[in-house]
Image (cartoon, rainbow, N blue to C red):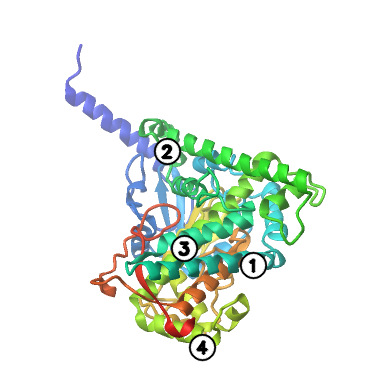
Amino acid sequence: MVLPWYSVLVSLFVFIFFLHKWFFTTSNNQKNLPPSPRRLPIIGNLHQLGSHPHRSLHELSKKYGPVMLLHLGSKPVFVASSAEAARDIMKTHDLEWSSRPKSIMADRLLYGSKDVAFSPYGEYWRQIRSIVVLHMLSNKRVQSYRHVREEETSNMIEKVKQMCDSSSSAIDLRDLFCRMTNNIINRVALGRKYNEGESEIDAKATLDKFVELIGTIDVGDYIPWLEWVNKISGLDSKVEKIAKELDEFLESVIEEHISRNKKEGNSTDETKDFVDVLLEIQNGKETGFPLRRDSLKALILDNFSAGTDTTYTALEWIMTELLMHPRAMEKLQNEVRGLAQEVTEDDLENMHYLKAVIKETLRLHPPIPLLVPRESTKDVKLLGYHIAARSQVIINAWTIGRDPLSWDDPEEYRPERFLNSNIDFKGLNYELIPFGAGRRGCPGTAFAIVINELALARLVSKFNFALPEGIKPEDLDMAECTGLTIRRKSPLLAVATPCSSCY
């Protein structure tokens, strides 16, 4: 006997109802959970993330408060949107919130999440972070790369000058910043440049694809039984292709270093790049912790990718805000030109307005606005709310930087707010956390900031900048791209004019 169509429909609704109760009904044993928006069966609140989750979560936080509970598929995810909540997570209960949730994308692209950023908390993570902090990004090591930063920023200045001499058209500042940063990171991390015709491997193109994918939401992380969708959408094959390209690239870099060291002997301490450092400690003689090949590649990729993408993204946002606020640009130029004709890193310490400009831009445009999610290792309280072990938390640094409880006129671009303020982005002031804080804070902050400071100071020292003809500051397109790192959707174009008194 054939059932009427409405019987099938009723059965389907009953099935969805019970499935909803199975996945989403909150146990009576759970106490004092944060407020939560209504959710749909199966997908929960996934549909509310939108194309720009930091903005969507910002709007939801206005209604549900500084701590709210979302259900992304079958996973409970807590969202922190205030400095107080961030302090509770990254200071008061930093150890309890020190792990990372499992990420299929990170596992596939980073050798089973064997890097520093995505590795779960434990002995392995403690060892590799120690290697990065003590051997790769110590103050002494960062200073040893000073000549690389100064050479590449000088090359950038010369390139802008050549563009000014040959054409009056606008300059693509994103491309300029990306190439400069990529060259610095290539030389520091990998030992030489891998672009601009110097190699058949285009490191920049490969890196762009990696960054796009690592920020992609994988439905399998939240609804495991729908993981098969990635095969149909083509995401699986795309990830497999990029993972293979990355592995071949990293293998070639490592083999090139091994071959060179056999021929020439080990590099001196002043000329060592990150790969040299990792190869030296690979056998564990210095650290007591041997590095397997996959771990070595994951650490190289971590430093190579994180150092490039976020640094040039920040520079582009800084110049965007300065072009929109000519008075701030003029004030910055006056400070820099008044202190040094040929800017070196020694001059940066006295450039207080320059530092304020960078802080104000990072407040409004943190390159990774949702930071990297954390996971609780045990039951913990968050501003009094009960959070079960193995719960995921997202810290919305974008919202925290715009919180009227922490900032006067938070939507206004005003670098002066930092001139008489001790607030910094080094992880001690939770109103400003573009690089995170606590155990899982970014270990490369100092390295990234000195690149930003030197590049910005040299640019405004030598050139005057303006928007292309016909574009007013208020008309500048501020649309954002999607992904883990949030840059401008369209590249920033500007007209540069050499400062006649600066040469």
First reached walking from the N terminus: tag 1 or tag 2: 1
Q: CA distance from mark 4 to mark 3?
A: 24 Å
Residue 81: in sight, yes or no? no
Q: Which residue is mark 1?
A: 147
What is the three-letter code of the residue carrying label 4? Gly
Query: Disc 3 versus disc 2: distance between alpha carbons?
Result: 39 Å
The quadrant of the image that shows the N terminus is top left
Q: Earlier in the sequence, mark 4 or mark 3?
A: 3
* Coordinates of residue 102 in the picture (x, y in percent): 54, 43
Q: Which callout, 1 or 3, points at the residue further toward the start of the chain?
A: 1
Q: Looking at the image, how many numbered discs can be counted on the residues? A: 4
Q: Could you say whether the residue bearing mark 4 is in a helix, strand or loop?
A: helix
Callout 1: 10 Å neighbours few (<14), some, many (20+)? few
Q: Which of pointers 1 and 2 indicates the residue nearer the eye?
A: 1
The answer, for residue 131, to whether it is visible in the render is yes
User: 8 and 416: which one is in front?
Assistant: 416
How far across and how far down the image is residue 220, in percent? 44, 37
For image coordinates 63% across by 49% down, the residue present is 299
439 w.r.t. 74: above or below:
below
The tag on residue 338 is: 4
Which badge, 3 or 2, comes first in the chain's sequence? Answer: 3
Residue 316: % across, % down: 42, 66
Secondary structure found at label 3 = helix
The reply to whether callout 4 and callout 2 are in contact (CB within 8 Å) is no
Question: Which numbered marker is on residue 467?
Answer: none
The residue carrying mark 3 is 177
Q: Secondary structure at mark 1?
A: helix
Residue at 76% x, 59% y is: 269
